[in-house]
Amino acid sequence: MHALSSRTLSLAGRVAAPIAAAALIATACSSASNASPGSPSTAAGPASPASSVTVQTRTGPLGSFLADGSGRALYLFASDTSSASTCSGACAAAWPPLTATGPVSATGDAASSDVATITRQDGARQVTYAGHPLYYFAGDSAAGQTNGQGVDGFGALWWLVAPSGQKITTTASSAPSSSNGY
């Protein structure tokens, strides 16, 4: 009887170990895929160094607009106020906030004096520009893309931000054509 129970335990261990390893890998992969574009993973522990965030400018058919240090377009949400973001949950999944755990700076035509942060309801520090909380659009998969421009979603419109801090209300269909590939 003892040999049978040892064999049963050994078989249970051989079945459970791969299942546990697969669950651990799946959890790690899903945590990495939930990170905001251009921002540090929220799964990082306290030993993670603070990362800096740079707001810069990029030029395309819609004019000069704000982008992160990698050239990813940044948007404002028309229903936000300068002291609070109104985008969370499903909204923040589609429009991930630009967050910072370290210093925030500006380069190019972006003004350092217009860059600041606010604290989101989840405790994250969201970068603002001229009082506007900044976001990415999940539909932009590469630097320079502006697929979120003029989108009406989650109760208000989404706009690129000009270096002046004003929303850019021109859309691709009303922008002059460009031969530079944008």
Image (cartoon, rainbow, N blue to C red):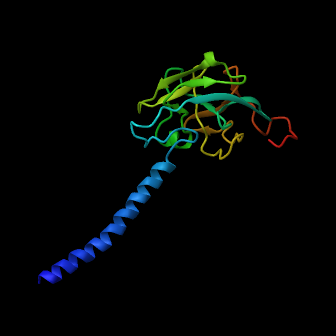
Quadrant in the rendering for residue 7: bottom left
Q: Nearer the viewer, residue 18 or 78?
A: 18
Residue 78 percent coordinates (x, y): 60, 28
Quadrant in the rendering for residue 43: top left
Quadrant in the rendering for residue 8: bottom left
Q: Is residue 180 left or right of residue 48?
A: right
Query: Which corner quadrant holds the C terminus?
Result: top right
- Number of marks in the image? 0
Q: Is residue 32 left or right of residue 164?
A: left
Residue lying farthest top?
113
Q: Nearer the viewer, residue 67 or 45?
A: 45
Residue at 60% x, 44% y is 138
Q: Nearer the viewer, residue 164 or 171?
A: 164
Residue 65 percent coordinates (x, y): 71, 29
Query: Which corner quadrant holds the N terminus?
Result: bottom left
Residue lying farthest left?
1
Residue at 62% x, 38% y is 152
Residue at 39% x, 36% y is 46
Residue 136 percent coordinates (x, y): 60, 37
